[in-house]
Amino acid sequence: MATGTGHEPATSGFGVRSVELVDPSRPTNESIPRRHLPTDLYLPEGPGPFPLVVHAHGWDGASWKFSRLLGTWASAGYAVAAPNFPRTNAGTPEELRDLGDYLNQPADVTFVLDSVLAMSARGGELEGLLDPDRIGLSGLSLGGATAYPLLFNHRHRDPRYRCGLLMSALELPYHDDPYDFSRRIPMLTFAGTADASVPYELQQDTIAKLGGPAWNVTLPGGEHATPYEDPPSAHDPVVAAGTTAFWDLTLRDDSGAAERLLEALNVEGLSFVDVSDPQNHPQNHPRPHPRPHPSN
C-alpha cells in the first residue's frame, strides 16, 4: 500500500494494480488485429464507491510517469484508471510508434472506461468500488488531444464525464468531426510559459474557446511535462493541490473546494488563474509575457 496527502474525505492509503485490457474489435496495425491497453488502477482503501478519474498520457508517456500525481488523487479518495496507448507510450517499439494513432485513442479511452465500470458492476472483481455517475477525464499533451474529442467532439463526446483536466494540451483535428467548444462543462487547464512542445500561445487559443466554467492556470516558467510527471518541479504543490480541489468541487460537489481551488492556483511566483464563465462574469488577471521557448 502507498500513502499520500489530500483534502477530506481522504483515505489512509491506496493500492495500485495493473490490468491487461484488450480490445479485440479494433486493430493496432495491419499485423496486430487487436489493441492492447495495459492499465494502472489506483484504488483507495475503503468500501467505495469512489469517484473515478481516467487519465491519458502524452507522446512517449506512460502511466508510471504520473505515479506521484495519480497517487495524490488516490490518497484523497479518487480511483484512477491510467491506460498505456499501444503506439504512443514510452515502451512502444520504434517500428510501432505512430503519432497519428492519437486518432484511435479516444476509442481506447472509451474501451478502458467501459471495462473498468464493468469490473465494478455486481459480480465484478471491483464490485461497488467505482461511482459511474462521478467520472472525470484528464490528459497531458497528446493525451489532451485524446481528451478534447471525448469532451467536445460532435460525434465522440462522452456524456459520462462530468469535468475535464487538461495539462499542456494540444488540440488536433479529429477526422472530419467538428468540435463544439460551446458545451458547458467544468474545465481546469494548465499551461506553462516555457513549454517548448506545445507553445503557450497555441494552448491559449483553444482555452479561449471553452464554454466554461473554466479555471485556466498559467505556470510562469512552467515546462511541458515536468510540472505533472514524477521528476520534481517547483510547480508540484500547485498542481497537486489544485487538481485535487478541482476533483473535490466537480466530482464531490464539495462547496468548500471552490475557495481551496483558488487558493491553490494563485501562488505568487508560481501560478495564477483566470476564472471564466461566459454566462456570468469572468474574473481575469493579467497574464505575464510568455518566456521565449526554443524551437522543437
Image: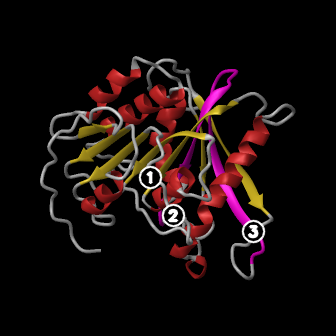
Q: Which residue is mark 2?
A: 178
Q: Which residue is mark 3?
A: 26
Residue at 80% of width from left, 64% of height from top? 24
Residue 128's tag is none
Identify the element where label 1 is drawn. Answer: loop
Q: Position of residue 60 (x, y in %)?
A: 48, 66
Q: Which residue is mark 1?
A: 181
Residue closest to the eye, 282 or 36:
282
Q: Position of residue 27 (x, y in %)?
A: 73, 72
Residue type for callout 3 = Arg
- Horizontally, is 55 left or right of 210 in the view? right
**Label whose residue precedes the other's in the sequence (1 or 3):** 3
Residue range in magenta is 32-59
Crowd tier of the residue under label 3, counting other residues whose Cα lies within 10 Å: few below 14, some 14–19, many 20 or above: some
Residue type for callout 1 = Phe
Q: Is residue 292 above or below residue 47?
A: below
- Horizontally, is 169 left or right of 135 in the view? left
Picture quadrant of residue 198 = bottom left
Residue closest to the eye, 219 or 174:
174
